[in-house]
Each structure stands twice: as structure tokens, then as C-alpha cells.
Image: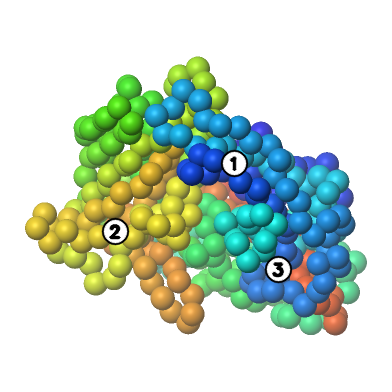
Amino acid sequence: MYGNQLAYPIVKLNSNDQLQLEFDDMDADIKSYYYNIELRNADWSAVQMSYYDYVKGYPNQRISTYRNSSQTLTRYTHYQLIFPDRNIIPTKAGNYVLKVFINGDTSKLAFTKRFLVVDPMIVATAQIQQPFNQQVFRTHQKIQLTVNTGNLNVSYPQQQVKLVILQNNRWDNSLQNIKPSIVRNNIYEYNTENDCIMPAMREWRWLDLTSFRLLSDRVRRQQNTNTAYDLFVIPDVSRNTQRYIYYKDYNGLYAALTNENVNPFWSGDYATVHFTYAPPGNVPHNKDLYIIGQMTNYGKNEGAKMIWNEDQQVYQTTLLLKQGYYDYAYALEDKQGGRTRYLTDETEGNIWETENEYMVLVYYRELGGRYDQLLNVSTLNSMVNRPGAPGQF
């Protein structure tokens, strides 16, 4: 969101809400970056619609705000985009992909980002509960949901109303294809014992890189030159048998921040950061290990996959990170049914008391409609209204 690095990118349809995109070009030159947006369905599949069916404005627009880095060892060019603006305006509610490409050539795609446009026409109420099932009673969290579609024409709720539940903004482990357990006129309840249950994980690991001169206690040593910083993080181990400790975290996100009195976007420096993970018994896992969090695009970026070092009996990887505050976790890749998920059961463990942010997305498709409209976004925190939780009385 504009002015809030930790908010999920959501704008309300036909409002003045705006989003802020910041990115760096490590070539440190000036390129002609352009962007456009693309409407998607609830499952992020392509819609069968023309661009001008869901956009008012131009097909492509140049990103014209940029400046060179200053007071940094690592040279880069920082670009900024604030949108929607009068050049490109989404006219439909739903899932969108922002595409950034070079020289106005859509085949030269630089990267993509997801964002949401909501038209709040549906009411949803949700709360977090401890599951009744004894097998997951101490390790999972349950979301109880009620959806009221109001005056919308819903003849086939199983097909027309779709729910997606995100935990800490993650799409890889999102809950989808949830069916209502009770239907009463225009009210749908999702409350069976085994529905809407998610592993709770535990508070995310953290890394404070707000300064490369005054290092945090998570950095073991540094190896700097006149042109670069190299930082070595204290080796991590599995936490699934450790005692649970609550502390405030960013729930997997990161923020560009500096302790120095400089702008973190174009005066924040970069460091090559070395991560090490020692598995239990120094025995490699039977699945690929990844470092996840927003800093690796939840396992998708280069360097997210950990490499097994046979000589040292540990996993290692290296990431180029900008000054800031980072949350991260270790997860094993799981591929089933054409879907890739990252599971933290063995590496982090699951504790029911963990603080998590959840987001419930409610989609609606008209009879004969060509796309899924996003008509409700509800956010809730697992700590709210829980007796004995931090900040609760």
C-alpha cells in the first residue's frame, strides 16, 4: 500500500486508493521500464476478456520516476511507481498481475507483482479458534467463517461463490475450494471440523540489517572490502522441538529501513548475506530445502534453494539483500497435484499459540460471467480476543 510497506497491495474499486512499487536495477544504468496490468481469476488463471474490458487508459505506461543510488558502495538505479493513476485504471474487481517490462516490449518481461482490487458487496465474518480435533489441537489454527451474499443472484453457491484464505500473505499454502457446510438463503457457513484448518508454524526468524556498521546479534561476522559488504548469519537449526517463545514479528515480510539518517530506498546499501542451516543429526532432508519469506518471493527467487555442503554437513545459500529488517523461515518443497507448497513442519514446527495474520477473500461469478469478482476482503489476527494472549486481558 502507498506509505505502508507491510500492508498487502489492495485497492478499493472506484476509489482514490493507490499502491507504491519500489525496485532497484542493479545494472545502475537508465532503462525504459513500462508496465501494464492483467486481470486474473480467483485461481490466477487467465480471463477470456479483452484488456479494455477491465482497464481504462493505455495498454502500456512508462515508469518515469527514478534516481541513482547515493552514499552507497553498491551502485544501482532506484525506480518508483505509484498507481493506479489516470493512465491505467482497473475497472473490474478481482485478482490482478502488474507486469513490468523493458522498452515497451511485452516479450522482455522484467518481473511481475500481484495485487487485488475489491468491490465490497459481500459481508463476511470470521474468527480464529483452536481446533477440536485432538490430532491438530496443539499445532493448528481454525478459521470459522460466515458469508452473507446479500442481494446477489446466487443460484449455484458451490460454483458461484469461491473462498480463498491466506496465512501471512502466502499463496503457496493458501486454502482454496472450500465448500459451505450450511446454506440458509443468502448466508453460507464454513464450519465443519476439518475445514479451514492451517498449520500455525511459529514466529518467523528475523534478521536486522538496518545497519552494516553496527551489526545485530544475528550476524556472526562481516568480511568487507572497499566495494562490497559480506555478512555471515549465525547458523540456524530446526526449531520444531524447541520451546515456543512469543515475540513480535513481521509475519514473513520485510521493510526497507536504515538506522542512518538516509532514505532507505535510494541510499540503502546492499550486502551479500550468507545463510547456513544445520539439519537434525546433520542428515540432509529427503526434499529440497528453501529459505522462504517475502525476501525470496516465498521460495521463487534465485538463491532461495539451499545447497547441501557435504564437507560441512550443512545447507548453505547466499542472497544479495538491501538494508532493512527481514523475516524468514526454512521450508521443504512439496509438489502435489501440480501445486508447489513449502512446508515448515520439520524445520520450524507448529504451535497453536503462534500469532498469525489471516486474510479471507470472497469471490463471486455471475451466471454466464467471464471472471471472478473479488467482493470481500476480511483480515483477522490469531491473537485478537484470545484470553491470555499478548495485549489481551
Q: Which residue is mark 1?
A: 30
- Mark 2 burial class by Cα count in 10 Å: few <14, some 14-19, many 20+: many
Of pointers 2 and 3, the one earlier in the residue sequence: 3
Residue at x 12%, y 61% (from the top left corner): 310
Q: CA distance from mark 2 to mark 3?
A: 32 Å
**Residue 230 location (% of width, % of height):** 28, 36
| Residue 264 appears anywhere in the view | no
Q: Is residue 322 left or right of residue 345?
A: right
Going by the numbered disc 3, the residue's amino acid type is: Arg
Q: CA distance from mark 1 to mark 2?
A: 33 Å
In which image quadrant can residue 50 be found?
Answer: bottom right
Q: CA distance from mark 3 to mark 1?
A: 31 Å
In which image quadrant can residue 151 be found?
Answer: bottom right
Q: Secondary structure at mark 1?
A: loop
Q: Which mark is residue 40?
A: 3
In the rendered view, would you say 35 is above or below 38? above
Query: Pointers 2 and 3 in contact (CB under 8 A)?
Result: no
Going by the numbered disc 2, the residue's amino acid type is: Met
Q: Which residue is mark 2?
A: 306
Q: Is residue 298 left or right of residue 288?
A: right
